[in-house]
């Protein structure tokens, strides 16, 4: 059939099973939006308040569903406004396809109005990107973009299309193609690597399993649970790995790293074998790399060979799809028990619980109450900061793709847009975005988007009137010099949210929170809860910058040192 470039873009999206797109129109992409208008019964377009919100929404959609998220923007500032969202997706290996338009081919390189080399700008933060200057290349490039985004280690791909390619008068023959689902990466899995892994596991007396986001991406949760059942080992996770293993299981010890539990940090420091599944040894996990898991042999399972020995020297590696690797390892293992080791871990769990002041309204209580009132059956999105760590510590994630947060880039302003994408992708799930007041200020305009489309997300603001995590560092390491971290001004989030069309409540007590959150759960509309908490509540445990994770400390430890 004979189609224009804009028609080809829409047909290719339909080929890929895309039914939701997030974006913002503008001059150079008008031809595509005109065609999108004609297909609004097939592809739902969500007009966000800002292009960054569109990128975050596509990211949240992808993380919640496992599908490729799609966002669109016009040239120049429209395209550059996507950059933070693309970088966020890149750092956390999220499959997103960003489609941007550019000025006509003959106008490229002439400083034309709203012209920018967005392919050049995004080269370091995409898995791949393309600029399409010929309509004959368009369909093939879009198909390749989707394949690249979801193959192997996923990531964002950008497709920039010049306006003349989408001109309604520019028509070529288009042949539909049924896309092939990419197969898991198995050709790199060597039998001798599997055998070595099995040998290390069988010889270990104090094994520990550390799980990252790759276990979720590969769908390895069932094989992971089987592995733990077979080898009777404790399990910790990174921020990105939450939900890969049941957070209510007796073997689970909590997060590892800068704000990980003492049980996880001490256990990893003491174990004789650390089995790492789909994780990249982030500096926030390892602390001082020279002292990380220094008593252990390290077995690293990952799909990306570039991650092997990049940050931490390992003893053995298996490269490939984590789910397939665990399946092959599990088939060769015999059930073992590590009673003495697990007793020690349980003793530490009892000795070093996560605690907080239960007398007042605070972030820890709010997250625990959200967990209790949702029965752990919600998708939690977060911004970045103290509230993010409390969401990781005090909500127990039982299933994959239920914590959606910016781990690698640490993007303030991420969570609200991501919550919209998650809710669009999983309409039957309760979706809650947990934010600090500093983060909420950055992209709170997306409340207007939620209200416009009546997307019933719940926005919980843990409002301490400061930039909480930065203030915590200033308190502990900068002599209490609170440079530009106090936000105690006249901004009223309740009035702002109501002005944008949402319901909103100001919360000052635990009783008010429970009542308001219950109303939010049953509202069927976007609701904002502005929860007033103390400015000096801190996230503990904590590892000091440059310290070893075995040196994790709490407020009680600080008090003991002072006394």
Image (cartoon, rainbow, N blue to C red):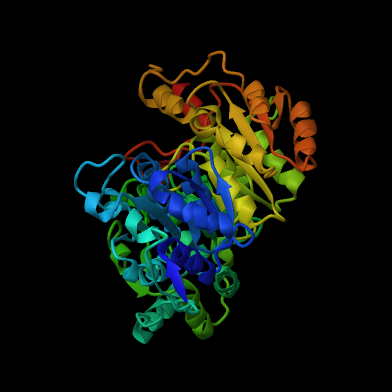
Looking at the image, which residue is at 74% across and 45% down? 372
Question: Which residue lies most toward the left here?
Answer: 110
Q: Nearer the viewer, residue 9 or 146?
A: 9
Looking at the image, which residue is at 42% across and 65% down? 4
Q: Quadrant of residue 399?
A: bottom right
Relative to 243, 193 lies left or right: left
Q: Nearer the viewer, residue 510 or 114?
A: 114
Q: Position of residue 149 (x, y in %)?
A: 41, 65
Looking at the image, which residue is at 62% across and 24% down? 496
Looking at the image, which residue is at 57% across and 23% down? 464
Q: Nearer the viewer, residue 481 or 524?
A: 524
Q: Position of residue 247 (x, y in %)?
A: 62, 56
Q: Position of residue 537 (x, y in %)?
A: 56, 26
Question: Which residue lies most toward the top here?
Answer: 490
Q: Position of residue 529 (x, y in %)?
A: 68, 30
Q: Residue 205, relative to residue 53: is it above or below?
A: below
Relative to 457, 16 lies left or right: left
Q: Nearer the viewer, residue 253 or 55?
A: 55
């Amino acid at each position: 059939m004979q189609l224009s470039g804009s028609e080809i873009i829409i047909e290719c999206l339909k080929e890929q099973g895309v039914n939701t797109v997030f974006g913002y129109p503008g001059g150079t992409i008008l031809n595509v939006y005109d065609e999108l208008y004609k297909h609004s019964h097939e592809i739902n377009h969500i007009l966000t308040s800002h292009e960054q919100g569109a990128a975050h929404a596509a990211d949240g959609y992808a993380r919640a569903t496992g599908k490729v998220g799609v966002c669109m923007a016009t040239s120049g500032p429209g395209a550059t406004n996507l950059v933070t969202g693309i970088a966020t997706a890149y750092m956390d290996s999220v499959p997103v396809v960003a489609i941007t338009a550019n000025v006509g081919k003959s106008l490229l390189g002439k400083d034309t109005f709203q012209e920018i080399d967005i392919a050049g700008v995004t080269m370091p933060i995409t898995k791949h990107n393309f600029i399409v200057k010929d309509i004959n290349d368009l369909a093939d490039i879009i198909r390749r973009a989707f394949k690249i985004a979801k193959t192997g280690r996923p990531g964002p791909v950008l497709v920039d299309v010049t306006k003349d390619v989408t001109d309604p008068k520019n028509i070529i023959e288009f042949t539909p193609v049924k896309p092939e689902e990419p197969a898991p990466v198995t050709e790199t899995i060597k039998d001798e690597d599997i055998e070595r892994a099995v040998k290390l596991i069988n010889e270990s007396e104090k094994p520990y399993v550390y799980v990252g986001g790759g276990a979720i991406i590969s769908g390895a949760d069932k094989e992971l649970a089987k592995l733990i059942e077979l080898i009777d080992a404790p399990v910790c996770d990174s921020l990105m790995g939450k939900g890969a293993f049941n957070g209510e299981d007796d073997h689970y010890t909590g997060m590892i790293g800068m704000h990980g539990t003492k049980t996880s940090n001490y256990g990893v420091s003491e174990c004789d074998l650390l089995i790492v599944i789909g994780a990249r040894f982030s500096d926030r996990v390892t602390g001082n790399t020279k002292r990380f898991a220094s008593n252990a042999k390290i077995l690293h399972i990952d799909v990306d060979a570039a991650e092997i020995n990049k940050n931490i020297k390992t003893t053995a590696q298996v490269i490939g799809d984590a789910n397939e690797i665990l399946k092959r390892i599990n088939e060769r293992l015999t059930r073992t028990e590590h009673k003495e080791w697990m007793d020690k871990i349980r003793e530490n769990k009892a000795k070093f619980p996560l605690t907080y002041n239960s007398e007042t309204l605070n972030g820890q209580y709010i997250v625990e109450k959200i967990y209790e009132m949702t029965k752990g059956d919600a998708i939690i999105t977060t911004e970045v900061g103290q509230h993010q760590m409390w969401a990781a510590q005090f909500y127990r994630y039982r299933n994959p793709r239920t914590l959606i947060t910016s781990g690698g880039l640490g993007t303030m302003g991420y969570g609200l847009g991501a919550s919209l994408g998650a809710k669009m992708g999983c309409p039957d799930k309760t979706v809650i975005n947990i934010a600090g007041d500093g983060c909420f200020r950055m992209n709170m305009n997306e409340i207007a988007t939620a209200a416009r489309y009546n997307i019933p997300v719940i926005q919980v603001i843990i409002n301490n009137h400061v930039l909480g995590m930065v203030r915590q560092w200033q308190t502990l390491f900068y002599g209490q010099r609170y440079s530009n971290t106090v936000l105690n001004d006249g901004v009223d989030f309740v009035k702002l949210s109501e002005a944008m069309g949402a319901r909103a409540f100001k919360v000052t007590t635990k009783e008010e929170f429970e009542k308001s959150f219950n109303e939010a759960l049953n509202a069927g509309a976007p609701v904002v809860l502005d929860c007033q908490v103390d400015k000096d509540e801190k996230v503990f445990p904590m590892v000091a910058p440059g310290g070893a994770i075995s040196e994790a400390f709490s407020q009680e430890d600080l008090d003991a040192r002072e006394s």
